[in-house]
Amino acid sequence: MTWTEILEDKTLASLPYRIESDRWGNIVMSPPPRSRHGEYQAAIAVLLREQKGGGISLTECPVQTEEGVKAVDAAWVSRERRGSRQNDPVYVIAPEICVEVVSPSNTEAELSERKRLLFQKGALEFWLCGLDGEMVFFDPGGQIPRSRLCPAFPGHIALD
């Protein structure tokens, strides 16, 4: 099944699950994230919008990888890169900044694989937001002390 077919399927749209795909176009569903997960996503997207010009911040960004379509929790994409995707329902080049909010069910191997896939698709930085709001930043060379693309981004997200 293609990503366009998945998006157009009204039965799938009504399901209360997060939908991604695997490399063969099979649908992969996971339970909806907890409310705190969404709060971190929103806070990160707002901070990216406030601190990073020349593009847009978004949540639940679909990126086509060699392992299927993965939904990035929060992202920042430049206007130039966003414009290159035309009207595709999925990003074939990852946004420059891709952020995953860690869920209790995530494994280190899963997050490491997601990071690898997104760097392979052109992400310049990959960030993790821990269960407590702690931020960890990576570039393709490994962990970095802070974002180079958005150096003022905080190392901890505090939810009110």
Image (cartoon, helix red, strand yellow):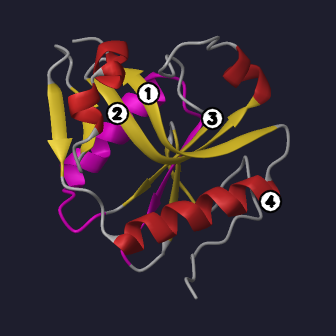
99 magenta-colored: no
132 to 66, vertically: above or below: below
Disc nearer the start of the sequence (2/3):
2
Residue 70 circle label: 2
The CA distance from mark 2 to mark 1 is 5 Å
List the residue tagged with mark 3: 96
SS label for mark 2: strand
Q: Label 2 is placed on what type of residue?
A: Lys
List the residue tagged with mark 4: 50
57 to 82, vertically: above or below: below
Residue 74 left/right relative to 13: right
Q: Which residue lies furthest to the bottom in this view?
A: 160
Q: Specify few, some or many for label 3: CA neighbours under 10 Å numbering under 14, 14-19, or 20 or more.
A: many
User: Considering depth in this image, is 33 or 142 the residue closer to the camera?
Assistant: 33
The CA distance from mark 3 to mark 4 is 16 Å
Do labels 2 and 1 touch, CB within 8 Å? yes
The structure residue drawn at horizontal position 29% and vertical position 11%, both measured from the top left corner, is 2
The CA distance from mark 1 to mark 4 is 23 Å
Disc nearer the start of the sequence (3/4):
4
Question: What is the x, y in percent for residue 152?
Answer: 77, 64
Q: Specify few, some or many for label 1: CA neighbours under 10 Å numbering under 14, 14-19, or 20 or more.
A: many
Residue 63 circle label: 1
Do labels 1 and 4 touch, CB within 8 Å? no
Which residues fall within the magenta stretch?
103-131
Disc nearer the start of the sequence (2/4):
4
Do labels 2 and 3 touch, CB within 8 Å? no
Residue 150 circle label: none
